[in-house]
Image (cartoon, grey):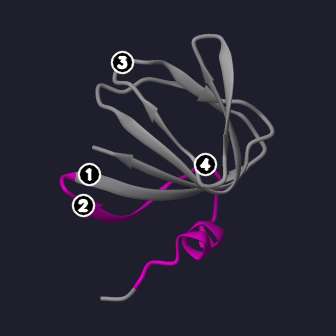
Amino acid sequence: MSPIKLSQEAHDLPLSWRSKVVGHAAGANIKVLRMDASAYPNEVHDFVEALLVIEGQMNLEIEGETICVQTGEVFMVPAGTPHAVAAGSRGTLVIIDQ
């Protein structure tokens, strides 16, 4: 087994905002995607979702507030919490979910 180059995996994706599962650990999906400055619509899940920015910045909208998640930071979205990504978010995002 060799390391997964997350930035390269995201760069190689044909479309922004379309995640790719790169692995599974402890029952969770490990996904990567490329953010392209466009907004991503509101969504809600019945599980906790971890959003880890490995390059760039994500402007996460939760409960009327915009939270800037920077390179090297992770935001844990609680189960049942509606969230969206505001325009201007760019870079590589790792999503850990069920």
| Viewer-side label of 1, 4 | 1
Amino acid type, label 4: Trp
Q: Are marks 4 and 3 in contact (CB under 8 Å)?
A: no
- Residue annotated with mark 4: 17
Residue type at tag 1: Ala
Is residue 4 depicted above or below 85 in this figure?
A: below
Q: CA distance from mark 2 to mark 1?
A: 5 Å
Outermost residue to the left: 27
Mark 2 — residue?
25
Write down the region rendered in magenta: 3-27
**Residue where numbered disc 1 is placed:** 28
Vertical comparison of 43 with 54: above or below: above
Is residue 43 shown in magenta? Answer: no
Marks 1 and 2: in contact by CB < 8 Å?
Answer: yes
Q: Which residue is mark 3?
A: 80
Q: Quadrant of the N terminus?
A: bottom left
